[in-house]
Amino acid sequence: MKRVIADITKANPGTEERLFESLSRSVAGASHDVTVICFDSQSDRVRSSHPAFKIKSLQYGTHYTLIASIVKDLLLEMGAILSDEDSVMVLSFHREVLTLGLEFQAQLKVPSEFQSWSTLWKGLGSPTLTHAYLPAQAFRWPVTLMTMQEALRVLLSALRKSGAIDLSTATRQAELRYLLAANDPRFSKQNPAASVPGLIAHLVKAAEERNLIELDRSDIVNPHLWLRGGSASSVDERPSRISEQEKKSSRSEELINMLKAIDLGPFSVIRPYLYDALAEVMGGGPNTVRFVLAQSVELTRTKCNDANLRTNNYPWRKVRQFLINLMTRCPVLLDSAGQTVIPSFLTLSREVVALRQNWKEELEGELIIALVEAGAEIQLIDIPLLAGALYFSRQSEDEERVDTIISYLIQKGTLAESATVPRRLVLVETKPISHTGDYLQTDVLPDQSAVEESKLTPADAESVQMAS
């Protein structure tokens, strides 16, 4: 039997049936079992058209790293039931899903293939998916957002500002949401009228039909686009070329990668459960640092399972390391004398009795401080991007959480607005943090008004690895 995992979360709206058609042709004549990973907005159409398919439905906008984790869990479950007569096929548009093949092709011990839908489609000699959008009658432009004419003006302005005047300077379709929202906040996904599936693809199609833009569809999923007949002289504003890093990932993804590079998660989905578990463990009375670390992670695992989060193969050791690293940078455990205790080999047997006041704001704030330290340029307009990085969501309540934490750090005197770049966050210089034995002692922060804009001297914090 051919066991198929078909991830369609990145498919253009309206192309799903064509993808399933290519899948059917690929597995024709062989018995097969298909599990489809899709968004809530796609699940009803898939269920009605293909009742035999198993469906794993996700909230619209679920991050690709979590999608890859879900596919990995499915492969592990599949590996336990495979027979010598079975084979495995994984189909996706996400690179992170397809690269799982490097790990699993040997591990599964049966024939397996990890293919992009585009490769499968072309390999079957199918016509290109160039115009596979929702039929015109199925998509209605949300007039509550703005008129189509106004939307096209915003699009052209965004392309001019990005300097997209030919193929060499072209913008990818996946970048358009960020560019459009930067030009007109109404395009932000926080606006319900702008979160309609297929909105960006429909706008691009409308611009192409009016000969306003040109497209290179060698990548049918994420084509390049630029102003038709564009030239440097025809651009109203000076082009500000998007960096190669921004070409590869969104700003939110860039911030996530910065935190990953310094082993600070951010484990956006489970971090709230981790904090709840830490509070619950500390509320149970005095315990050793060793117990607090181990039990907090174990209780987090239980809470995630109770919330129906698929965490069977979650990197829990990395979650434990994340907690250690975060509490090393920002100690929040208190002993009976009220002194903060840093997790270390010397303090694993130390008894702690409470958490610092505002400990949650301190830990969340440390993630933002780490980003600024690492060189992230965070301005007021970046709050939605920061919310996306820290919480995998850009809902208004998540933006408010980010705003509250930044305000807390500014009031505390840890962050300030730049004196040279308006509305940009910078670190406030403090006196060095000093260690005495197993404890952390900090001198009083200088008054914020007396501090010149500068970079914080890094604390001589210990790097700790817990024994297995």
Image (cartoon, rainbow, N blue to C red):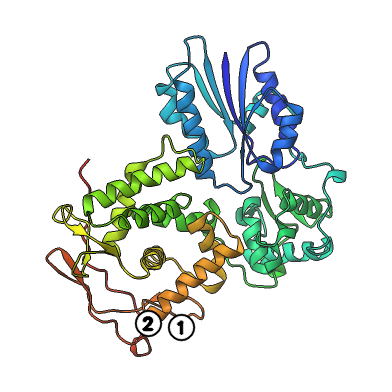
> Could one spot residue 332 in this view of the protein?
no
Left or right? Give the position of 60 relative to 329. Answer: right
Residue 446 point in image, percent of width and height: 30, 85
> Could one spot residue 104 in this view of the protein?
yes
- Which residue is rendered at x = 48% and y = 56% of the image? 254
- Check disc 2 and report its element: helix, strand or loop: loop
User: Mark 1 or mark 2, which is nearer to you?
Assistant: 2
Residue that numbered label 2 is attached to: 453
Residues at discs 1 and 2 in contact (Cβ within 8 Å): yes
Image quadrant in which the N terminus is located: top right
Left or right? Give the position of 397 relative to 133. Answer: left
Residue 112 point in image, percent of width and height: 50, 21
- Check disc 1 and report its element: helix, strand or loop: loop
Q: Examine the rendered structure and indicate whether residue 22 appears above or below residue 94.
A: above
Instruction: Please tell me which residue lies in front, 286 or 385.
Output: 286
Q: Which mark is residue 310?
A: none
- Which residue is rendered at x = 83% and y = 63% of the image? 147
Residue that numbered label 1 is attached to: 420
**Within 10 angstroms of label 1, few (less than 14), some, or many (20 or more) residues?**
few
Image quadrant in which the C terminus is located: top left
Separation of residues labelled 1 and 2 (CA atoms) = 9 Å
Q: Examine the rendered structure and indicate whether residue 184 appears above or below residue 175.
A: below
